[in-house]
Image (cartoon, helix red, strand yellow):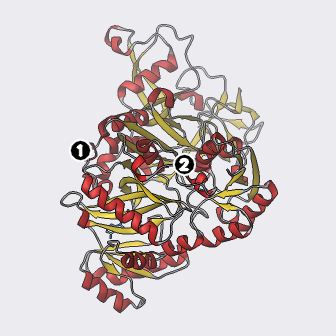
Amino acid sequence: MIPSLLIANRGEIACRIIRTARAMGIRTIAVFSTADANALHVREADEAVAIGPAAARDSYLLPANILAAARESGAAAIHPGYGFLSENADFAQAVIDAGLIWVGPNPDSIRAMGLKDAAKARMIAAGVPVTPGYLGEDQSPDRLAAEAARIGYPVLIKAVAGGGGKGMRQVDDAGAFADALASCRREAAASFGDDRVLIEKYILAPRHIEVQVFGDRHGQVVHLFERDCSLQRRHQKVIEEAPAPGMDGETRASVCAAAVTAARAVDYVGAGTIEFIADASQGLRADRIWFMEMNTRLQVEHPVTEAITGQDLVEWQLRVAAGEPLPCTQDELAIHGHAIEARLYAEDPAKGFLPSIGTLEAFDLGDPAESGVRVDTGVEQGSVISPFYDPMIAKLIAHGATREEARERLADALDEAIVWPVRCNAGFLVEALDHPDFVAGRVDTGLIAREGEALMPPALPSEEALIAAATALTGPAFVPGLRLNAAPRRAGMFLLDGQPIAIDFAEADEADEAITTSVLMSEGGQTWALAPFRAAGKAAGGASDGAILAPMPGRVIAVDVAAGDAVVRGQKLLTLEAMKMEHSLTAPFDGTLAELNAAVGAQVTEGTLLAKIAEA
Ligand code: ADP
């Protein structure tokens, strides 16, 4: 067995690999950029080596730095995870040349599948069905346009070096072809340094079906059945499941056999995925499923396959890399139940899915022992989500005897997720899992785009949740169900994630145990903070001691006063930026600025005393 393993990655996949390696008694070595010095994967590994600055191209993507870290730490093997250098054949070769074990396929297999056009040509030669299209050398716009017309619109232009959903353009008619080609080329040149494209028939209502394959150095290749990754947003997977809904035994046998043929055609060793596209307009049919590409690494969505087969794919990878035969033969593998995975992204669905960054002041995805839902994550409460890397912060994987059982478990777990003040897509995932088409297994890659608005989680918490939170802030005696018979109601002013909101709630009997800073409320996968309005120094008529507290974690972006200044009631003192919004903090009464603890640029936590006004 491998004695020590360097994981050339970060985040959840680094933690995932460390977990299995540790269980196998392998010494684990993490690498980290300056932005990740306090990251979870660094703490979970036995050792960690710094590899450079925050930008991935200067750290995680630099082969020389990774190899130096391996030398320094005496690592025997390198696992690349996914993304970063995982499909870089030159890096794989450099690892091998350095006398280390590369946990992945032979560099030649990576090369053979690296470019979409060459891979398709190779698959055609091996007898694997591929999507109808044009793979030619002639890249002149005229020839490409003629080929598009021959294939028949709509077509898809794809960068041959593309990946991650980038460098693709759907073209619906000949008139739009020239512009789409030019913009696809620009994106391909910028993202992949290669502006060549291929053209494919655009499959309407397609499903993304992929097959997990595994090879060893003893000539064995097996498949571990299929996954369905049809739920995508902008060609990026959001929810994946195994097995594929509606897949009959005969079709499965055919597509899995094609996947094994594809893997054998490139002498595949280790974990790989053969991606197919299915025209599911008449259900899944063997003659309407075509090879799209091969991913020569472990996939993000591998846990659904682990759940239904009961195998640990990272353990398989490490055994195969050590030269052992595959742990199972094809006959020993079977599907048990159903599994669904959801990808949790630090992004704000309400703002066009803009990535959301900052400190995870609250982060709770539930206890797997209670929910039965596996959580793979690279962060924890207190972690900082930086703008440098992929915004995926966790994966939740539910397994059940039936698809419905898995779906309900996953939706329940996401419903209770608490992530704050960083925004996440949990509310959106809950809506997607509960969508009638998803419930019925009618999935295709266009579902999210079509249903966009319908999948948007509510902008505000329910009235019930607001009242409960308002009551928690003012006192514990309130019972929502008894509201009509309870204390007299009144309208109070609060701050909901920094925005003023009036809540009609019942005043509690005993206010002495009231929470004075803020409460988090979570509903449908979304989390909001409710704070008393006065915390921002805007005491609504009530007494104030003149303390100007930060109503939420944020960054001071302007300070308009200096210590000792005379201020008047309502005068702007400073501006806090939180949740990408600006909040002005004003003087609650006339006086002088007795204390100023804030400087422009300072990161402050909730409740920090920023300034203090002394009465004049
Ligand atoms: P990438 O390498 O960037 O991930 P893929 O070739 O794997 O690109 O395609 C990504 C997604 O784009 C697929 O999962 C599918 O949703 C969509 N797609 C790809 N090819 C086609 C096609 N010919 N017709 C319709 N949709 C397609």
Whole-percent x, y for residue 401 in the image? 34, 35
Q: Residue at x 36, y 30 (%)?
A: 462
Whole-percent x, y for residue 608 in the image? 68, 32
Q: Quadrant of residue 430?
A: top left
In the image, what residue type sits under mark 1?
Ala
Residue position marked by numbered label 1 in the rendering? 440
Total marks shown come to 2
Q: Residue at x 67, y 39 (%)?
A: 604
Q: Residue at x 49, y 60 (%)?
A: 220
Indicate left or right for 542 with 237 as reference.
right
Indicate left or right for 246 with 276 as reference.
left
Q: Quadrant of residue 93?
A: bottom right
In the image, what residue type sits under mark 2?
Lys
Secondary structure of residue under mark 2: loop
Q: Quadrant of residue 209?
A: bottom left
Whole-percent x, y for residue 289 in the image? 29, 65
Give how far apart the Cα atoms at labels 2 and 1 are. Answer: 38 Å
